Image (cartoon, helix red, strand yellow):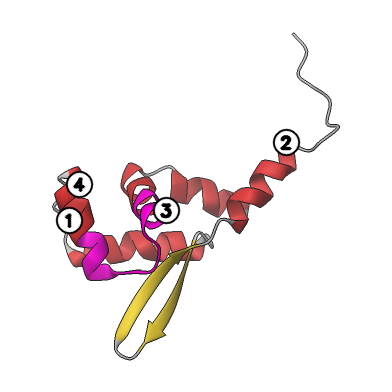
Amino acid sequence: MAEDVFKALADPTRRRILDELVERDGQSLFEICTRLVTKHGLGLSRQAVSQHLAVLESAGLVVTRREGRYKFHDLNTEPLKRIMTRWLRPGAPEDTP
């Protein structure tokens, strides 16, 4: 649902998480937390990052997979593509002043 995607993207921390997954897909919660601290100076608790990931997952922007006892997070760009093509279709009329 587009509303969920916009809500997820509204938060700068969630956008940084997505940036990190663009740079390196398939990260664990620990890896994401470490990258947020070292690259962005965000000292968030694992629980806070986990809650942000849950919002991103609910919006379909992140998918998770389990390997043994580890959970990995992958970026899913399909919801963004659907939103983009909703308004940016080939042949759609251009805005006129």
The reply to whether callout 2 and callout 4 are in contact (CB within 8 Å) is no
Residue 29: in magenta span: yes
According to the picture, the residue beneath numbered tag 4 turns out to be 39
Task: Estimate the x, y position of residue 65 in percent, counting from the top left.
Answer: 43, 79
Could you tell me how far apart the alpha carbons at marks 1 and 3 are, in whole angstroms?
Answer: 20 Å
Q: Which residues are magenta?
A: 19-33
According to the picture, the residue beneath numbered tag 3 turns out to be 22
Amino acid under disc 2? Leu
Could you tell me how far apart the alpha carbons at marks 1 and 4 are, in whole angstroms?
Answer: 13 Å
Could you tell me how far apart the alpha carbons at marks 2 and 4 are, in whole angstroms?
Answer: 33 Å
* Residue 44 disc label: 1
According to the picture, the residue beneath numbered tag 2 turns out to be 88
Q: Secondary structure at mark 1?
A: loop
| Viewer-nearest of discs 2 and 4 | 4
Q: Is residue 85 left or right of residue 90?
A: left
Q: Is residue 8 left or right of residue 30?
A: right
Amino acid under disc 1? Leu
Q: Earlier in the sequence, mark 1 or mark 4?
A: 4
Task: Estimate the x, y position of residue 35 in percent, counting from the top left.
Answer: 22, 55
